[in-house]
Image (spheres, rainbow, N blue to C red):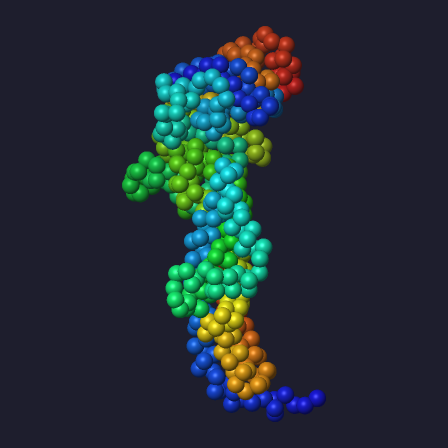
Amino acid sequence: MMNIWENIRWDIIVDYLPFFLKGALVTIGMSLAGVLFGLALGLLIGIGKMSPIAIARLPFIWYVNFFRGTPLFVQILLIHFGLMPIFMTPVNPIASGVVALSLNSAAYIAEIFRAGIKSIDKGQAEAAHSLGMNKLQVMWYVVLPQAFKRMVPPLGNEFIVLLKDSSLAAVIAAPELLYWGRAAQGEYYRVWEPYLTVALIYLILTLTLTYLLNYLERRLDTE
Amino acid sequence: MISVQNLKKSFGELEVLKDISVEVNPQEVVVVIGPSGSGKSTFLRCLNLMESITDGQVLIEGKDLTDKQTNINEIRTEVGMVFQQFNLFPHKTVLDNITLAMTVVRKWNKREAEEKALKLLEKVGLKEKAQVYPDSLSGGQKQRVAIARALGMEPKIMLFDEPTSALDPEMVGEVLEVMKQLAKEGMTMVVVTHEMGFAREVGDRVIFMDEGYIVEENEPEEIFGNPQNERTKAFLSKVL
């Protein structure tokens, strides 16, 4: 076997490093926006899915069914080439990526919210109601703070998945991390240098996220 | 103060309360006893609408709970409830457990609420636990905090739903002691319990329930000393 280190063309990595870093920033930005919109939308969908009226639950159930039951890749293509041109021309691929990630993660986050809220003992809400609190106060002061603590680990998981899945936006030419990896491969016809570098940067991002989430979990635990 | 007329409650096909009528007077301590499944907890939970009422009427200080116009949250501030499982808020300190509804529902300012809460904690003998979280308390301590939390709203009526049933035997006494004190101060109380000693000593009136009906209702001496109904006799012979 040939010596990999002697054959590595470091110049490619050095050449493309500024683009990789710029791409990483876009990756972080897209993921962060996707998480934030996904959280807001996911909360609403989760609450909608818990409606006591069966017919009111239906659209939310099918939202989750669709976005969990079809590949994100397909969703990105549908959104970028089908949905987004209705709203903007030319379509900004970063915007398409953010919309796709938000809509997709909202479906998963809705389920996390729902499971978190359902996991809180009924006695908690009863005690709060018995003190004269209304539904909103019970939710806000008693149920959600406890549910949130239980939602942190699965939400963290979802964020990590989202960060990695944002790489799919490379196919619609959103200039994120993998996009620049593909560009480097196209320019130099080399596989290992660009893709291993890109993989390493993704790993650094997800490990940082893991560390931050563990920290948050510990902070909430000692309370 | 509490007036229940022909109360019926069903869970689906299952009729748990069949025809309950009872009056509770101010400052009275009414103890509800009966075998499990007799409907006594359900009856209690209908008094602050923790359970919806299928048929009949419940009046709390003249306000009809079945009337759609009645603001149930307002009535619940006047009717405190203590649960078998304590149901303290684990994410809040003992003090915050008590002050939460005082500030959020009663809209008292935080300092005022905390002063009152500390007085209540002193009353139940747990002032030094104000800053700890419920997880570090024993069962008896938790239930005393739960009583203090309910009292924080300054209710006119207190409902107790088997408050000592989830406690280790050695902790039952400390909770009953607080309840006795409360009765002595003139609180109107409805207590569902298996503590026959408490019923006899503190109750002004004892209600024996079985299979969704009030079978017998009388002063404790009469119920325990001279029960009239066969089912009361059978139940008491098992628990005494």
Image location of residue A180, percent across then percent down = 49, 78
In this rendered view, identify the residue nearer to me: A166 or A210. A166
Image location of residue A63, percent across then percent down = 51, 50
In the image as oriented, which residue stretches furthest toward the bottom? A6
Vertical relation: B109 (above or below) A165: above
Image location of residue B204, percent across then percent down = 46, 15
In this rendered view, identify the residue nearer to me: B130 or A131. A131
Vertical relation: B140 (above or below) A11: above
In this rendered view, identify the residue nearer to me: B29 or A31. A31
Vertical relation: A148 (above or below) B122: below
Vertical relation: A146 (above or below) B193: below
In the image as oriented, which residue stretches furthest toward the right? A1
Q: Which residue is rendered at x = 45% and y = 60% of the image?
A: A83
The image quarter containing residue B98 is: top left
**Residue B222: in sight, yes or no?**
yes
Q: Which residue is rendered at x = 52% and y = 30% of the image?
A: B163
Instruction: Report the label total.
Output: 0
Q: Which residue is rendered at x = 54% and y = 83% of the image?
A: A186
**Residue B91: in sight, yes or no?**
no
**Which image quarter holds the N terminus of chain A?**
bottom right
Q: Which residue is rendered at x = 53% and y = 25% of the image?
A: B41
Image location of residue A195, percent across then percent down = 56, 79
